Amino acid sequence: MLLGVNIDHVATLRNARGELEPSVIEAAQVCIKAGANGITAHLREDRRHIVDYDVFAIKNDLKCKLNLEMAATYEMKKIALEILPYSCCIVPENRQEITTEGGLDVYSQPGKIKEYVKPLIEAGIQVSLFIDPERNQVSAAAETGAQFIELHTGAFSRAYGKSNEDIEFKKLKQAASFAHLLGLKVNAGHGLNYQNVSKMHDIDGLYELNIGHSIISRAIFTGLDCAVSEMLSLVNKN
Ligand code: PXP
């Protein structure tokens, strides 16, 4: 499995003071040097953490694999086509939410999503749809032309160590295997941490995990390079 490090919360800390520290681009550099396979950044409509120049700098100066998370809006499509990141992960966005709460509802709008992602795919961008681990969402995602889905692991992460852990885990496993049957590549992310991430090895064929909050949190105590290396050793473990 590959590891994409989500660096949104480096920007959260920077924006808390409205200054330039900590540097998002420097953080991305450290992650890549520590062995991360790519950098994920969510350019939200309200620019609450990552801002436009962060994603342009990651793509143009760092030249690493950038996974741009974004809502399915006209503005974001325009930016993505300008930046041409390695991949775009389409997420739902709600102004009031603290973080991405649920998956994208592809099932009720497959035609709209298909039309939205078409120019991104034609521009050579790998497109991923962030969905809940539900059969109808997976089959709708397969109709859109997107090459990837990213399974929302938030419910599993919240259930970890509790009585409903197995139920939530089974949903992920079944959704991943159904997606593979339909020819989709499968990523996963949200709420994964140093305790629960090893369970992802029990899901066959996962391609990449996108992990942010737990890595940036640990970095406060260990340094970012150690936090990334430690996560990588768990992600790469067979
Ligand atoms: N994947 C997606 C699509 C997300 O929206 C997020 C959160 O921004 C993550 C992964 C990373 O989640 P976390 O910060 O909880 O690791």
Image (cartoon, grey):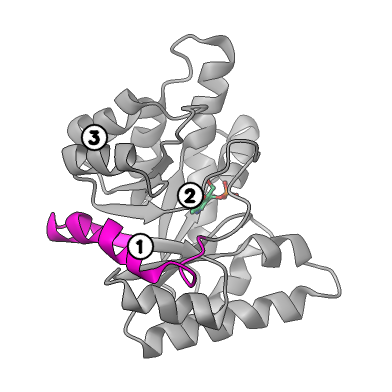
In the image, the residue with mark 2 has its CB under 8 Å from the nearest atom of ligand 1:
no
Q: What distance separates the C-alpha of mark 3 from that of mark 2?
A: 19 Å
Q: What distance separates the C-alpha of mark 1 from that of mark 2?
A: 36 Å
Secondary element type, mark 3? helix
Q: In the rendered view, would you say 18 is above or below 98?
A: above
Residue 149 position in % (x across, y down): 41, 68
Q: Residue at x 49, y 46 (%)?
A: 228
The residue positioned farthest toward the bottom in the image shown: 181
Secondary element type, mark 1? helix
Secondary element type, mark 2? helix
Residue 238 position in % (x across, y down): 49, 76
86 vs 1, nearest the viewer: 86
Marks 1, 3: nearer the viewer: 1
Q: Identity of the amino acid at label 1?
A: Ile
Residue 112 position in % (x across, y down): 35, 62
Disc 1 target residue = 113
102 vs 38, nearest the viewer: 102
Q: Can you see residue 207?
A: no
